[in-house]
Image (cartoon, rainbow, N blue to C red):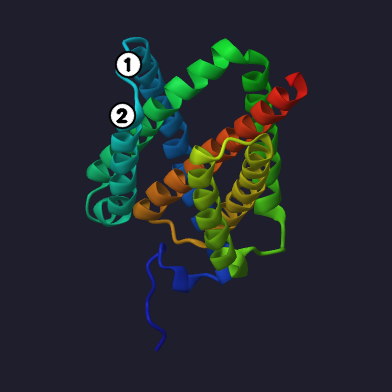
Amino acid sequence: MEPRYRYDDPRAFPLEQVAPAVSRSLVATTLGLLAFSFVFSVIGGVVGLALAGAGVVGLPFFIILAIGQIALIFALRPVAARSAPLGLLLLYSFTFLSGMSLGPVIGAYAVAAPGVLGQALLLTAIITAGLTIYGWVSEVSLARFGTWLLIGLLTLIGGSIVAIFVRATWLEVLLGGGGAVLFSLFLVYDIQRLKQMPAEFANAVVMAASVYLDIVNLFLSLLRLLGALSGSNRD
């Protein structure tokens, strides 16, 4: 005697009929969370810009924000798996703090190099749209390159620390260009991961944070690259 299946039991249907529905559900939730993440990031940016205008922003300010963001990222999955409301609170707190750290940077470029800022925003939008489509339709998987992407990220962080002490245009160009390539690959990697994940809320929260970071870091890398090239052209 065949076991009885509920209508929503995936065993009752061929895999190819179930997977697309699961993917669409996860993607829709992730995109919704991502959109609100950028809203909270903009709000945080306004607050950060106001604090910069008040003279509050300095190295300790950015260090505290960085520590807070790292703590929230590590807590995101376990908390979201236990409680959806708390998961949302952590996600939007993270993007709010991220926006606070971005606000002074964007404000400085808006005053000193508005053309560079506009170019970086436009390029980020174009690259993000193109790579999102590519990651979704491409059959070339980047899953096996996850370790190499992590090594690239650690190398970029190390180079950024060196750049604090070594002021050189060539280093800024290298870090900006390398970061743009690296986070473009991370974006494709995460979009492809999104296609394979079960439609669970914790996965949607984590993927929203991951894609948010990919886009923001792509933007910052392009800003760094274009700013360095613009400065070298003036010299």
Instruction: Name the quadrant containing residue 175.
Output: top right
* Residue 28 seen in the figure: no
Q: Which residue is drawn at 52% across and 70% down?
A: 13
Q: Is 120 left or right of 62, judged from the image as shown?
A: right
- Count the numbered circles shown: 2
* Amino acid found under the numbered disc labelled 1: Leu
Tell me the SS state at disc 2: helix
Instruction: Name the quadrant containing residue 93.
Output: top left
What is the C-alpha distance between the residues marked 2 and 1?
10 Å
On-image quarter of the N terminus: bottom left
Q: Name the residue under label 1.
A: 51
Instruction: Name the quadrant containing residue 16.
Output: bottom right
Q: Is 184 left or right of 77, judged from the image as shown?
A: right
Q: Mark 2 points at which residue?
A: 61
Q: Residue furthest bottom?
A: 1
Q: Which of 28 and 82 is in front in this view?
A: 82
* Amino acid found under the numbered disc labelled 2: Phe
Q: Which of 22 and 40 is in front in this view?
A: 40
